[in-house]
Amino acid sequence: MAGNSFGTIFKLTTFGESHGAAIGGIIDGCPAGLSLNFEAINLEMQRRKPGQSAIVTQRKEADEVKFLSGIFEGKTTGTPIGFTIENTDQKSKDYSHIKDIYRPSHADFTYDKKYGVRDYRGGGRSSARETACRVVAGAIAKQLLSEIKINAFVSSVGEIFIDKPYQDLDFSKTENNVVRCPDETSAAKMESLIREMRKNGDTVGGTITCVLQNIPVGLGEPVFDKLHAELGKAMLSINAVKGFEYGSGFCGAKMKGSDHNDIFNPDGTTKSNLSGGIQGGISNGMDIYFRVAFKPVATIMQKQDTIDSAGNKAIAEGKGRHDPCVVPRAVPIVEAMAALVIADFYLLNKISRH
């Protein structure tokens, strides 16, 4: 199985399944001498872990990270950083009823056809539990990028959208509610909708907006490794993501060039920032902002028509512990993947200049 590594210099390789003994990863390319704040790493894990509120899956995992290598006396050594996260609350029996059934909009069918074998326990390798490993690596990348601010937040759930630009939001309020929306009025409506979906045995999607500030000019490697292309790949690799746009995004397609162009100030900044901080695939020093769309979680507590592995008609019905909306727990994942991309280009720039 290929495709388990992300990054060129600052590289993360992950392993493990949702209901195996543990998940984990290896981070290669982290510079030596970086003093790590383990409390900060744990905080990021707490933001992503299951069971943190009434509107997410009630699976109870401590998500404690055990570092195996690459760190000595609290500092990175420059060698591969190995780590594991034990799975302590897996309930595989919750999935025995779908052993031979393909759940609609899951990876069951494609994994079975591609590999000829399928770990049906919680989705196995296709489970979003794997993203915990990304958060570990992203937390370390954030510490490497101490001058750069990375803030993601829930900007919509279903039809409920924040009606303010990110410049008018106070990111310090993002963690003040279970939805992780910095606008209190919108957050209350979003939470109410998610609770309604859970009560009805259904799910709902949403979007996460991420803002990167204090980005240096010059990150990105045209023509195939443009900064926005790598950010797009990073976000689209996250479970349940269906779309990515940066800067003016799809709204820019409706505009005239005379309205869309970002006019320069004498110091090289721009009066507007519809480019989203990236021009020609290279960061220009302005804020980078993008939006990520998440589909409704595919597991619903309702009966659905499907087929089994022999092609016979069957009925699928969700059981166990699942998120009615994935976006609140996905906020730290989006930040982590953004940090991995920026760390990779940051280190690549340092090498190319020497």
Image (tube, grey):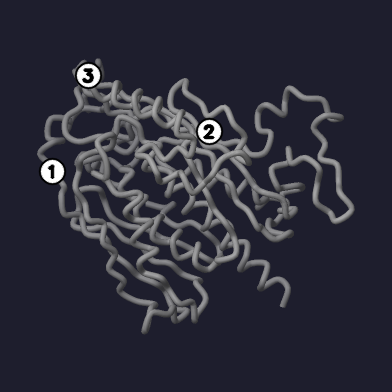
Distance from Cα at disc 3 to Cα at disc 1: 20 Å
- Other-residue count near label 3 (Cα within 10 Å), few / some / many at <14 / 14–19 / ≥20: few
User: Label 2 is placed on what type of residue?
Assistant: Gly
Residue at the image point whose x is 59% and y is 60% from the top: 148
Instruction: Give the alpha-carbon distance from disc 2 to disc 1, as whole Å.
Output: 32 Å
Marks 3 and 1: CB-CB under 8 Å? no
Residue at the image position 60 percent from the left and 36 percent from the top: 245
The residue that mark 2 highlights is 243
Percent across and percent down for residue 279 are 76, 47
Q: Nearer the viewer, residue 160 or 289?
A: 160
Instruction: Give the residue at x 30% y 47%.
Output: 129
Residue 38 in the image: state x and y as whole percent: 36, 69
State which quarter of the image contains the C terminus.
bottom right
The dot on residue 169 is none
Q: Earlier in the sequence, mark 2 or mark 1?
A: 1
Q: Is residue 186 left or right of residue 94?
A: right
Left or right: 135 in relation to 321: right
The local crowd at label 2, few if under 14, some if 14 to 19, many if 20 or more residues have their Cα within 10 Å, is some
Q: Secondary structure at mark 2?
A: strand
Amino acid type of the residue tagged 3 in the rendering: Gln
Depth check: 75 or 282 in front?
A: 75
Q: Percent x, y for residue 89?
A: 15, 49
**Tag on residue 91?**
1
Residue 302 is labelled as 3
Residue type of the residue flagged with mark 1? Lys
